[in-house]
Structures are given as structure tokens and as C-alpha cells.
Image (cartoon, grey):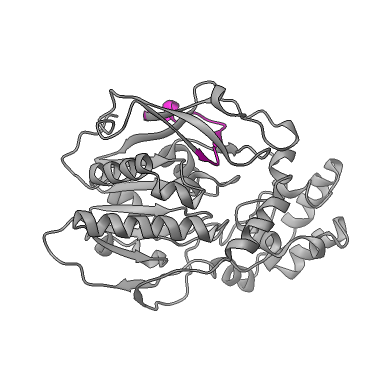
């Protein structure tokens, strides 16, 4: 399915946002640098219009197919969109979703797809595809007797540094206040069975883009099935395209549709399901300003127990070019179970200011306590 024009229309706004915030990475750990990754997803997959756009741009032969179909268009795209160095939008789109941006006529797609599929996937292509992944295992020491958290910040797709930094600062302050032990890393090599077993819960801080190798995916799934916890924040479920269906459809349980753009940030009313196990520290409702996600699929269909819903009558759920973002029933934060594991996701958190909002801080604190508690009740 092609990305809606409404989503494409926000490129200029995102470019301005990135220019203002910077795209500096953060990693507060040392790591054992491992051998180059060889088990990245889609390493051996044939080129096609469904390939990650970044993989097409990394291949001179595949890029030549695009250049022929859309002469000069690639050179005019903003760097954050067409860069082959993460973080980049090219990692969270396939060519199928980018045809409008490249001004490729619909009747040319089949021809482009056939030309791409005819290309060999070379050894160099495989190396280039795997370069954005890592096997670097963090070196760390965690004190005994404390709740242990892994704050994960590897981002290959869209990175809004201001929100990532604000979330980290809020969580570090929370850890100090609560006596938690928290490791911060952007090394996906932490996702191995031995390392994950040291943590009570993992927090994904606005992670965007496919970031785990095949073996890391299996280790993460096994960790959750055995009783680990996950807390996902905002951009962790904000990609327009996913290349790991289990992550979007089972783990998160919802697919991103879009967010308002006129204006992007609006005050809205949040309603709390007071029957939910995580509701005790929250008021029955509150109002706040943020970038409000809508989803094309409802997490209730994936078995989620919804904690927060968004009152669509309290803001304008309209995207660029009048995209209708109404869901009717509009989940905003929810919990779910994976085996014995506890999953929490909240769509709140684009604006840095949200991480000092009392209700949002209480929400995250309660969610982390719950996700890290192996005795906590998880409603399937």
C-alpha cells in the first residue's frame, strides 16, 4: 500500500524539525565490537518495489533503475529522506510507498519491479544491507538487589533528538528516584539471551526503523516469552512501513496511519480506563498537548487491554491534504501479553515537554514497574 499523500506532505515540516533538533546519537555504554553482521533481515531478498528504499539506494545497479524511471529526482530529495546513513527515512519506506515522492507514474511500477527483480543480489549488496545492524555487546555492571532496566535507543529510521533526549533524562531521573538500575545503549548486540536475562524489562525509546538481526529478533522473542517486559514509547510504533510483521501486528498490535499536521501539535482530552490494572496512579482524564498518532489497525484486535483512549472530539484528527485520521475508538496506550511477557505501549511522547507532564511521568513510572514485575497480572 502506498503512503498517503498526507504523510508525504509533512516532509518539509520534518526537515525543519530535524534541522532544529540535530540528529546526534547517544550511547552511554562501552561495547565489545563484534564481527560484521551477516544475518540481517532481507539480506538475500531479491530487489523489488517492496525492498527498503535504503537498500535500493545502496546498490548502484538498483539506483540506476530508479534514476532511469525518475531522472534527477533522487538528487533533489532532502538528505534526511534519501540518505544511506541511518537515521534516514529511506529505512522506513519501500519504493512502493515512495513513488509519489519520486513522481513515478503508477503505470511504470510493474516495469520498475521487473527490472529490479532481474538484478543479481551481489556479495557487496549483502554487506551494504547488513551494515546498519550491529552485534556489539555492551559492557556493563549492574548492582544487585535493584530493578534492572535496559533503555534501548538504536534508531535507523526517523530520529527526533529532542524527544529521545527528553525521554532519557526523565527516565534517568525516575530511576534515581525509584532506586532502579538502568543501562542506556544504542547497541542491538545487547539483544542476546545472556544479556537480556540480566534485565527485568527493556524500554524502547522512540526506536524507529528495523534494528534487530534475525538472531537478535529470536533472542528478544524468547526473552518476552519467558517473562521479560517491554515498554515502548511513541515513535516505537510510528513507522509508515515495517519489515518485521510480528513486531507491528503481534508485539505492538497496531500499524501507524498518521498524525495531524494542521496543526501538528494540539491539546486533546485523554480518558483513562479506571478498570485497567495500571490506572490507579492516574486521574480519570486529563488534557495535554502532543502529536497524536492514529492507527490503521486497532490493538484491541490483537488482544490488547487498552488503558488510555483519545477523545477525537477534543482536537482535529486531520492530516495533511485533509487526511481523515479518525478511528472512532482511538486507543492511545495499552498492555498485552507475549507468552509470560508483559508489553506496554504509549503513543504519547513526541514533544519534549510531555516528559515533564505529571500524568505522563506517572504513566511511564507505573508502566515500567508493571512491565518489570514478573508476578504482575497480564490480561491476555
Residue 93 vertical placement versus 316 (above, below): below
The residue segment tinted magenta is: 289-306
109 displayed left or right of 127:
right
Q: Position of residue 92 (x, y in %)?
A: 60, 53
Question: Is 296 inside the magenta-drawn segment?
Answer: yes
Q: Residue at x 55, y 41 (%)?
A: 291
Residue 101 appears in the figure: yes
Image quadrant in which the C terminus is located:
top left
146 displayed left or right of 87:
left
Q: Quadrant of residue 260?
A: top right
- Report the number of numbered marks: 0
Q: Position of residue 244 (x, y in %)?
A: 50, 48
Q: Residue at x 39, y 78 (%)?
A: 33
Front-most of residues 215 and 261: 261
Image quadrant in which the N terminus is located:
top right
324 displayed left or right of 76:
left
Q: Residue at x 30, y 33 (%)?
A: 282
Question: Is 354 inside the magenta-drawn segment?
Answer: no
Residue 199 appears in the figure: no
Residue 151 vertical placement versus 3 (above, below): below
Front-most of residues 51 and 171: 171
35 displayed left or right of 181:
right
Q: Position of residue 166 (x, y in %)?
A: 44, 57
Amino acid at each position: 500500500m502506498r503512503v498517503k499523500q498526507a504523510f508525504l506532505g509533512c516532509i518539509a515540516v520534518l526537515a525543519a524539525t530535524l534541522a532544529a533538533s540535530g540528529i546526534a546519537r547517544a550511547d552511554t555504554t562501552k561495547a565489545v565490537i563484534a564481527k560484521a553482521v551477516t544475518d540481517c533481515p532481507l539480506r538475500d531478498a531479491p530487489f523489488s518495489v517492496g525492498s527498503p528504499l535504503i537498500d535500493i539506494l545502496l546498490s548502484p545497479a538498483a539506483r540506476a533503475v530508479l534514476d532511469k524511471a525518475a531522472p534527477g529526482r533522487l538528487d533533489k530529495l532532502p538528505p534526511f529522506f534519501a540518505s544511506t546513513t541511518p537515521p534516514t527515512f529511506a529505512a522506513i519506506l519501500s519504493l512502493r510507498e515512495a513513488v509519489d515522492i519520486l513522481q513515478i507514474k503508477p503505470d511504470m511500477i510493474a516495469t520498475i519491479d521487473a527490472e529490479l527483480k532481474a538484478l543479481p543480489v551481489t556479495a557487496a549488496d549483502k554487506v551494504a544491507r547488513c551494515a546498519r545492524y550491529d552485534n556489539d555487546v555492551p559492557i556493563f555492571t549492574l548492582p544487585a538487589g535493584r530493578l534492572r532496566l535496559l533503555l534501548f535507543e538504536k534508531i535507523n529510521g526517523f530520529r527526533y533528538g529532542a524527544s529521545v533526549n527528553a525521554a532519557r533524562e526523565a527516565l534517568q531521573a525516575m530511576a534515581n528516584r525509584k532506586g532502579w538500575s538502568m543501562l542506556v545503549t544504542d547497541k542491538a548486540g545487547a539483544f542476546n539471551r545472556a544479556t537480556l536475562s540480566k534485565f527485568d524489562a527493556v524500554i524502547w525509546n522512540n526506536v524507529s526503523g528495523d534494528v534487530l538481526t534475525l538472531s537478535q529478533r529470536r533472542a528478544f522473542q524468547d526473552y518476552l516469552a519467558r517473562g521479560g517486559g517491554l515498554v515502548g514509547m511513541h515513535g516505537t510504533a510510528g513507522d509508515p512501513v515495517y519489515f518485521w510483521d510480528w513486531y507491528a501486528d503481534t508485539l505492538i498490535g497496531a500499524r501507524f496511519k498518521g498524525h495531524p499536521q494542521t496543526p501538528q501539535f494540539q491539546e486533546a482530552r485523554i480518558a483513562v480506563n479506571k478498570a485497567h490494572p495500571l490506572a490507579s496512579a492516574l486521574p480519570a482524564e486529563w488534557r495535554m498537548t502532543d502529536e497524536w498518532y492514529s492507527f490503521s489497525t486497532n490493538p484491541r484486535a490483537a488482544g490488547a487491554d487498552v488503558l488510555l483512549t483519545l477523545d477525537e472530539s477534543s482536537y482535529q484528527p486531520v492530516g495533511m491534504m485533509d487526511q481523515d485520521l479518525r478511528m472512532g475508538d482511538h486507543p492511545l496506550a495499552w498492555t498485552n501479553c507475549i507468552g509470560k511477557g508483559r508489553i506496554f505501549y504509549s503513543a504519547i511522547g513526541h514533544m519534549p515537554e510531555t516528559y515533564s507532564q505529571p500524568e505522563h511521568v506517572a504513566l511511564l513510572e507505573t508502566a515500567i514497574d508493571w512491565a518489570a514485575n514478573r508476578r504482575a497480572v497480564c490480561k491476555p
